[in-house]
């Protein structure tokens, strides 16, 4: 994807995807939310090639989702921790996980439960204003500079 | 990403990402939700190289997010429409759009409003069981075959 073209366009979906729109980046964020922070931890967890991991960590850091922290001076070593913007992306991963479990859920799966109630979580994207799940009510899209609106049902 | 490795693993996030974990695929789904269906419509809308578009459309069709429908017999031409599983992914795109608008929202943006109330939507991922936004309460993760649980706060 041409990240430069999409990163400043009108569509907020494309703007989001310009930063985190690939599977490796999202799996790195997932692992970071589990407490993984060091290069080798990500590498072993994901089975990712080191050069790709280096690129993805740099991109996530440049885009403000991860923050580099030096944990050793000699030799110089950094670890990567989630920023507020990175943490703010995590609920989306749970929504993707719910979709994955619904449509490709055969066999054993990692389960997430509410730590207090012990109940399996059921992630759903709602409109905070109406309280309704997104997709359950028609939406109207307005593109800057265009008169016509798009009705999405 | 090694889609084959992740597509049947324990993690439902990885299973989801194995199918739709790249920006082009997600932008194709976005465009399909706007009513685009034909190869050239996607190509023009996204400015995507034809060979990449061909691959993405085939993958999304093979994975059951799009369905091919023949709209012309001579010459033979297919269009691509969202399946139920594809439509079920769309709310995640709105959550990504909300993240994009929050963290990279400078300048004009496409806006989505509730068609009935006229109010801008505010997509948020909640746990349908507790009603709380995901991320606002600690979660416990259980991995098949592992005794220890992971507390995510």
Image (spheres, coloured by chain):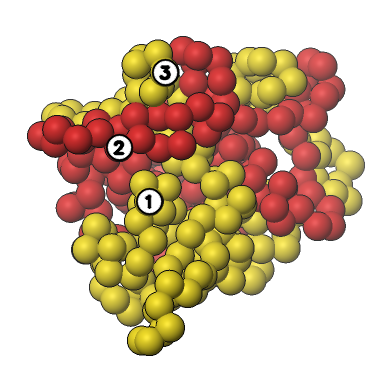
Chain colours: A red, B yellow
Give the x, y percent position of residue B58: 49, 74
Give the class, few, some or many, for how many residues have Cα within 10 Å of label 2's Cα (few <14, many ≥20). some
Q: In which chain is the residue bearing label 3? A: B
Residue matched to label 2 = A150
Residue matched to label 3 = B116
Give the x, y percent position of residue B111: 28, 28
Residue matched to label 1 = B35
Q: Secondary structure at mark 2?
A: strand
In contact (CB < 8 Å): disc 2 and disc 3: no
Are tags 1 and 2 found on a single chain? Answer: no
Give the class, few, some or many, for how many residues have Cα within 10 Å of label 3's Cα (few <14, many ≥20). few
- Using the rendered image of the protein, determine whether residue B109 is visible from the camera's viewpoint: yes
Residue B58 appears left or right of B118: right
In this rendering, the answer to whether A31 lies above or below B127 is below
Q: How many angstroms separate mark 2 from mark 3 (CA)?
A: 14 Å
Which residue is at the front of the view, A112 or B146? A112
Residue A124 appears left or right of B54: right
In this rendering, the answer to whether B30 lies above or below A132 is below
Q: Mark 1 or mark 3, which has the lower sequence index? A: 1
In contact (CB < 8 Å): disc 1 and disc 2: yes
Q: Secondary structure at mark 3?
A: loop
- Using the rendered image of the protein, determine whether residue B125 is visible from the camera's viewpoint: no
At horizontal 55% and vertical 52% (from top left) the residue drawn is B86
Which residue is at the front of the view, B119 or B115? B115
In this rendering, the answer to whether B67 lies above or below B112 is below
Quadrant for residue B46, please give it. bottom left
At horizontal 85% and vertical 49% (from top left) the residue drawn is B144
Q: How many angstroms separate mark 1 from mark 2 (CA)?
A: 10 Å
């Amino acid at each position: 994807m041409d990240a430069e073209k999409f990163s400043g366009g009108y569509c907020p979906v494309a703007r989001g995807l310009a930063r985190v729109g690939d599977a490796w980046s999202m799996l790195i964020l997932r692992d970071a939310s589990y407490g993984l922070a060091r290069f080798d931890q990500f590498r072993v967890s994901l089975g990712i090639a080191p050069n790709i991991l280096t690129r993805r960590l740099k991109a996530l850091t440049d885009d403000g989702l991860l923050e580099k922290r030096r944990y050793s001076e000699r030799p110089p070593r950094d670890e990567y921790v989630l920023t507020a913007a990175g943490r703010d992306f995590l609920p989306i991963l749970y929504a993707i996980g719910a979709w994955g479990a619904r449509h490709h859920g055969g066999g054993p799966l990692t389960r997430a439960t509410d730590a207090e109630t012990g109940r399996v979580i059921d992630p759903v994207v709602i409109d905070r204003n109406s309280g309704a799940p997104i997709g359950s009510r028609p939406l109207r899209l307005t593109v800057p500079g265009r008169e016509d609106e798009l009705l999405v049902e």
